[in-house]
Amino acid sequence: AQHLERGLVLARQANDPLAEIEALNRLAQMASEQGTYDKAQRYLDEVLELAREQDDLACVASTLSMLSTIAWRWGDLERAEKCCHESLVIYRELDDRHKIARMLNVLGILNTLQENNDQAEKYYEQSLKMAREIDDLQVVADLLNNLGYLNHHSTGNLEKAKRYYQESLLVAREIDHRHGVTSCSANLGQLHILLGEHQVAWEYLREALLQSVAIGTVPLTLDALVGVVQLQIEAGQYLSAAELLGLTLSHPALEADVGQVTESALGRLRKKLPAEQLEAAMDRGKTLQLDTVVAELAAMEVPDHLRWRE
């Protein structure tokens, strides 16, 4: 980030808009991965203005694509949809099938978040077909993961979700798509909790924690922590689960789709703890340091404090 900030200053001093755009784009990508969405959006708003001035359609489309992704992660679905459709129109004009497939994937995500499950599946399948035709394996891995999520959280077809996740994980590992491996591992962890296979769930969640820390993706760390919350509930560790949930829900990098999953965990805790106890535990969680909590959890090969019955 320090190198990019210095490069941005030099690009502006040299009146080099292309270098300025490149620096801003990379800074926005880093900010998005770290979950600082407000910063990422500010960078991208600058890029969009510069790209329009340069009449660079590909850059305009790319920036709108990133703005769309940040908007849905932030929970602004209206802006996400607007940016997505505008970007898709440009990519179709440019006949960029790689980017078209990615935007169809985003439309699938937006419809999943709005619980338009049939439409979401259509977008995912349309994008997957195109991604396979052009051999874009990263998009294939992401789409399989998203189809798994759809069946996992929306339609409740757990076996179908498991098959999608497993195929996604296989592809992601083959191409060293670490973001995909991390996301899919977190999803598989949460899925195996529902299947009653808690030790397997922990192994996937621990991998997700380790990978997310290694690549610095805070939103994926929070995703994995939601799975740990669910495991703690299964083990009867309700106060610990409530503290961890308080930390997760209060973090600004929490993505909209993960926020929806936490509602289920919160509903279960409300049935297990008196309201005052739950509120106090969640307040304590807000004071915890994410890095410290994750380091402690990731160090546990076998989580002794989680004693579940298989």
Image (cartoon, rainbow, N blue to C red):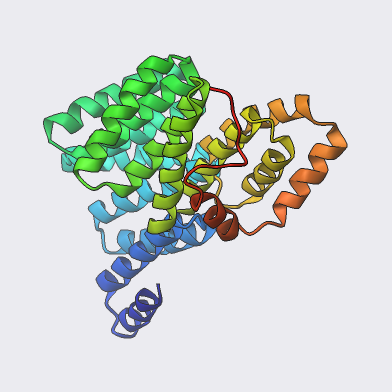
Task: Please indicate, yes or no, whether residue 100 appears anywhere in the rendered image.
Answer: no
x and y percent of residue 17 in the render? Answer: 29, 72
Q: Position of residue 235 (x, y in %)?
A: 64, 31
Report the residue at 45% width, 22% height from top: 152
The relative height of residue 192 versus residue 13 in the rendered view (above or below) is above
Residue 275: which quarter of the image? top right
Q: Is residue 116 left or right of residue 58?
A: right
Can you tell which quarter of the image residue 226 is in? top right
Q: Is residue 272 visible?
A: yes
User: Which one is nearer the viewer's eye here, 22 or 287?
Assistant: 287
Which residue is at the far right?
276
Q: Which residue is drawn at 54% across and 50% down?
A: 297
Hey, which quadrant is residue 165 in on the image?
A: top left
Viewer-nearest residue: 54 or 286: 286
- Taking the image as shown, residue 135 lies to the left or right of residue 49, namely left
Percent of width and height locating residue 148: 38, 25
User: In the image shown, does 188 or 134 lie closer to the viewer?
Assistant: 188
User: Which residue is painted at 36% across and 76% down in the image?
Assistant: 8
> Does 88 appear above or below 3?
above
| Residue 68 position within the rendered picture, expressed as x and y whole percent measured from the top left | 42, 44
Quadrant where the N terminus is found in the figure: bottom left
Query: Number of labelled discs?
Result: 0
